[in-house]
Amino acid sequence: MQELLAYLQDPELVARFQRRCGLYLMEGSNRGSGRITGEKPREQQEGSWDHQDRNSNYEYKENPAGPVQDCRKPRYEVRNWLLHFLFLLSAGLGHEVFYITCLPCIHWNLDPFLCRRLVNMWALVMYIGQAMKDLLKLPRPPSPPVVKLEMRVDAEYGLPSTHAMAATAISFTLLLSAPSRLQFCFQTGLLIAATLSSMVSLSRLYTGMHSVLDVVCGILITAVLILLTYPWWESFDSFQLYSPLSPIVALSLLLLLSYTYPELDHYSTTRGDTTTILGACAGSSVGYWLNVQLGNTFDLQGSLPVPLPALTAQAVARGAARSLVGIVALVGTRQVVRTLTLDALYSWYKLPKTDKEARKRKEIEVPSKFVTYTAVGLVNTIVVNRVFVLLGLL
């Protein structure tokens, strides 16, 4: 077993997959589409090179007297552009831009019930996955031999792959929840769910951000979580929508989890990203509860399961209009609330607004992100559908 785990964690396994897909690391060569042309070898550049923590690439320390060098840019050659863009698109399905657009679009254009289920499972698996990363502290694959295409998260630890967890959770939660609400071919849904989760998982190998072990563990952990929680989904729905304690539990528990997130000896984006997810879940949970109290949940009407909406030109246009209006509302809410929250926190702690590094401090990062995305969740669940009614889009 130990040999198998070591084999699955071998970075050369990831590098071989990248090369099979047409992605090659260019060391000491001026060739390649990702090569910084005219760049000097590292030992000839001004400044000094130091290693960061063991799960990240080297970084260049700028010499104040010398030119600024962008040496963290990966040097690589792409030989299969179709696969390259396909995997980059798949990797994007695990980022904030996808979550703030796709999940709400399911609420606006399909069924709020399904969106609620997805947000709940997404928050659960992401919190467990992110916390496991920072407790286990297993490194990401080193470069070389792999090519790393996403340097923003390189300071995070590797196991498990939360991209793989989120993609698996969202795909299969939707598959398991939809039959009671919508009429569709289950086999087709299974094929789509398996394809989407597989593409996102493989994209983590292509981008060089995870080992095979990270991805496999992410999928298996999510499968176990779905199996363990599935019998309780209906009971949790009832508590979330009808219990007077629901909004109190949602806000207090998820805020507590944000503040008690595992501490690291260096800054990582995991705490902020996790707080973002928990905040969105808290806002959505309170919003769905309030909709029940207000007497309009915007759920599907009629005898369930209902047929899938017909893809007529008019339906597509209305869906696109709803998505556009909704995304503008959410992005606007995010920008306004984040600015106001940061201004209030900077003022409270008497910090200069020019101190961007202060945003990494726990007392700034956690409340600012939690409040911002709680507001986003509330606007998504309460306000946007009512705007659609006023605009005649429902």
Image (tube, grey):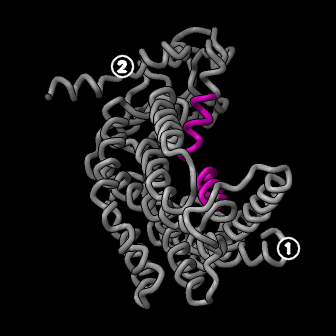
Q: Determine the residue located farthest toward the front in the rendered image.
A: 303
The picture quadrant where one finds residue 47 is top right
In the displayed structure, would residue 381 be above or below residue 309?
below
Q: Determine the residue located farthest toward the left in the rendered image.
A: 1
Mark 2 residue type? Leu
Q: Which residues are magenta?
A: 86-105
Q: Which residue occupies 28% across, 50% down?
A: 224
Q: Estimate the x, y position of residue 199 in percent, counting from the top left.
A: 51, 33
Q: Which residue occupies 61% across, 24% down?
A: 84
Mark 1 residue type? Leu
Q: Which mark is residue 13?
A: 2
CA gap between label 2 and label 1 equals: 53 Å
In the displayed structure, would residue 134 be above or below residue 30?
below
Label 1 Cα neighbours within 10 Å, binned few <14 / some 14-19 / many ≥20: few
Q: Dot 2 lies on which element?
A: helix
Residue 332 appears in the rendering = yes
Q: Which residue occupies 61% across, 28% down?
A: 86
Q: Is 301 one of the magenta-colored residues? A: no
Q: Dot 1 lies on which element?
A: helix
Q: Dividing the image into 4 quarters, which one contains the N terminus?
A: top left
Q: Is 103 one of the magenta-colored residues? A: yes
Query: Which residue is identified by label 1?
Result: 391
Residue 48 appears in the rendering = no
Is 281 displayed left or right of 228 in the figure? right
In the displayed structure, would residue 270 be above or below residue 387?
above
**Secondary structure mostly seen in the magenta stretch:** helix
Q: Estimate the x, y position of residue 359 in percent, counting from the top left.
A: 54, 63
Is 317 displayed left or right of 260 in the figure? right
